[in-house]
Amino acid sequence: MTELTLPTAEDTEAFGRSLGAVLRAGDLVLLSGPLGAGKTALTRGIAAGLGVRGRVSSPTFVIARQHPAGERGVPLVHVDAYRLGGDLTELDDLDLDTELETSAVVVEWGEGTADRLSEDYLLIRLTRHPDDTRTAELHPHGNWLARAVPVS
């Protein structure tokens, strides 16, 4: 486990940009943390690092949003599993295992639900502290154990 301190929301997005720059089709990233912890800010950064098209916002009401690939050729599927409330049937209906073949997939609120999509995933637990700084704990699983995750 690696822990990062992210002093500002901009730092959270910058870390996301670094991570997005190394993501490839088939990558699964699960984001965990309470409301306001920075999950969507991190995803905005990931999208920028991937170079995908379209504005990134929380997909809470649509559950999943696909962002077309940019120059790097890797689309982003951004999922908000909050409303699923652990209902794995609805998660299955999203066909994310198929999306994983051609896209990078980021699932907010994915810990404990979307981790069953693949044995290879990066779990990022975000915590927002009273002074508005954030901490990101990186928990790699499967092939992520051998991959370098940018931490600067």
Image (cartoon, helix red, strand yellow):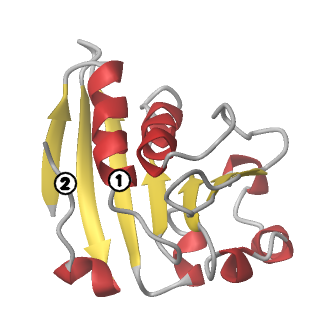
The C terminus sits in image quarter: top left
Image quarter of residue 88: bottom right
Report helix, strand or loop for mark 1: loop
Residue density around tag 1, few if under 14, some if 14–19, many if 20 or more, within 10 Å = some
Residue at 27 percent across and 15 percent down: it is 130
On the picture, is 1 further left or further right than 116? left
On the picture, is 77 further left or further right than 109? right
- The outermost residue toward the front is 71
Residue at 51 percent across and 35 percent down: it is 44
Location of mark 1 (residue): 21
Q: Amino acid at mark 2?
A: Pro
On the picture, is 99 further left or further right than 143? right
For the question of whether residue 113 can be seen, the reply is: no
User: Which percent across, then down, holds residue 68?
Assistant: 70, 53
Residues at circles 2 and 1 in contact by the CB criterion of under 8 Å = yes
User: Which percent across, then down, holds residue 112?
Assistant: 53, 69
Image quarter of residue 79: bottom right
Image position of 67 with respect to 17: above or below: below
Residue at 15 percent across and 42 percent down: it is 4
The N terminus sits in image quarter: bottom left
Location of mark 2 (residue): 150
